[in-house]
Image: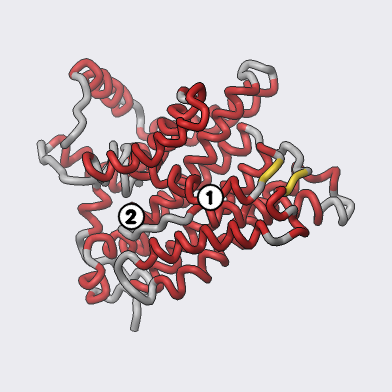
Amino acid sequence: MRLGLPAALRTAFQRVRSFYESWPPLARKWLAPLLLVVLFVLAWLLPRFGVIDLYWQQVLIYVGINIILTAGLNLVNGYMGEFSVGHAGFMAVGAYVASILTVGVFPRWGLSTYLPLLFPLALIAGGIVAGLAGLVVAIPSFRTRGDYLAIVTLAWNMIVKSILENIDAIGGPRGYMGMAKLTTVAWVYVWVVVTILLLRNLVYSNFGRGILSIREDEVAASLVSVNTRQVKVIAFVISSFFAGIAGGLFAHILQFINPRSFTILKSTDVLVMVYLGGIGSLGGSILGAGIYTLLLELLRPLQVWRWVVGPVLLVLLMIFRPRGIMGLREWGFLLPAKERKEAIAAQAAGVRRRGPPSEVVASAAPTDPGASS
């Protein structure tokens, strides 16, 4: 089943593309960086001058945080073809580490005045600790094949919640508070752009070809010198790192966190966003996170019943559209220049491609991505 665009919308897209392709090469080269800078300026100025009220600022921040979570999990569940269900556990690690630094460590060192400047360091520290936690989970999990990763990550999510509830130094079940409201629309925008760019470059690198080859056929990948276990572990650690970054941003917008914020329900929400937007697609991650976050806001009058939507939607997606809206496809502006040219040439030649250029290229033997001797 493939979703088609209305004829009028297709025609409009073709006209925009033709107009863009008529520009000089230098103008096209600098268009994307210029747009990113303009969007950053808008993300910084509009909230500052009250053009966007506090409610919509918070909604935009949640959308950005969910994009980071979804893109990171898509690396494992979409591009690599594994199934991790405990992403909220790594988010919790990043949230607590970043919060402890901004509440307990930096002020004790007399750095309270510089908290806005030190905030990125706290986020990166939370991401690193979450990545190390991911390493601890990945090493035993990837010794086997099949669905064991889902079982281990589910257990990990429960273990993290139980540990946090039993450490009184960080509030135990009461939670941890006192964080300054350091998460802003501009900061979230910066981290979304960094996340998408880093993951885009990773996926289309030689190492990324190894990740894609594991999804297609792990045995064949190992036969062409891909160290599959090493590639899996590294990809899982990177995914956990970005979950930690998202957790730190989440903690400093709510200014209060507790273990109940990071249950299996939160992990289910991230899974829904991955499979709604589409597996193996960064554009799908952006789309899925945006649609699902706004959908939950629209359903807020239903109160607690709106949380039923996530699990039900996940079941329906797995039955009727397991690849999601943009499964194994990608927006053109997220493709590297070489991949984009191949896609445009194939479309111009009338070749119907099954899947994105990444899928087509990944079917070839990867070039030494973590090769084993």
Considering depth in this image, is 119 or 34 the residue closer to the camera?
119
Task: Tell me the kind of residue under disc 2.
Answer: Tyr
Residue 329, picture quadrant? top left
Q: In the rendered view, tell whether residue 120 sits above or below residue 163.
A: above
> In the picture, which quadrant includes the N terminus?
top left
Question: Farthest residue in the front direction?
Answer: 305
**Is 202 left or right of 44, judged from the image as shown?**
left
Residue name at image x 45 percent, y 66 percent: 234
Q: Residues within 10 Å of mark 2 (few under 14, many from 20)?
A: many
Residue 206, picture quadrant? bottom left
Considering depth in this image, is 367 or 74 the residue closer to the camera?
74
- Asked whether residue 15 is in view, the answer is yes
Residue 108 rendering spot, x and y as whole percentages: 87, 55
Task: Tell me the kind of residue under disc 1.
Answer: Thr
Residue name at image x 52 percent, y 37 percent: 64
**Is 342 left or right of 252, judged from the image as shown?**
left
Callout 1: SS: loop
Residue 344 rendering spot, x and y as whole percentages: 22, 38
Residue 9 rendering spot, x and y as whole percentages: 25, 19
Residue 14's disc is none
- Using the numbered discs, state the Cα–Cα distance from disc 1 to disc 2 in whole angstroms: 25 Å
**Is 3 left or right of 157, judged from the image as shown?**
left
Residue 319, picture quadrant? top left
Q: Which residue is mark 1?
A: 263
Residue 79's disc is 2
Residue name at image x 63 percent, y 16 percent: 51
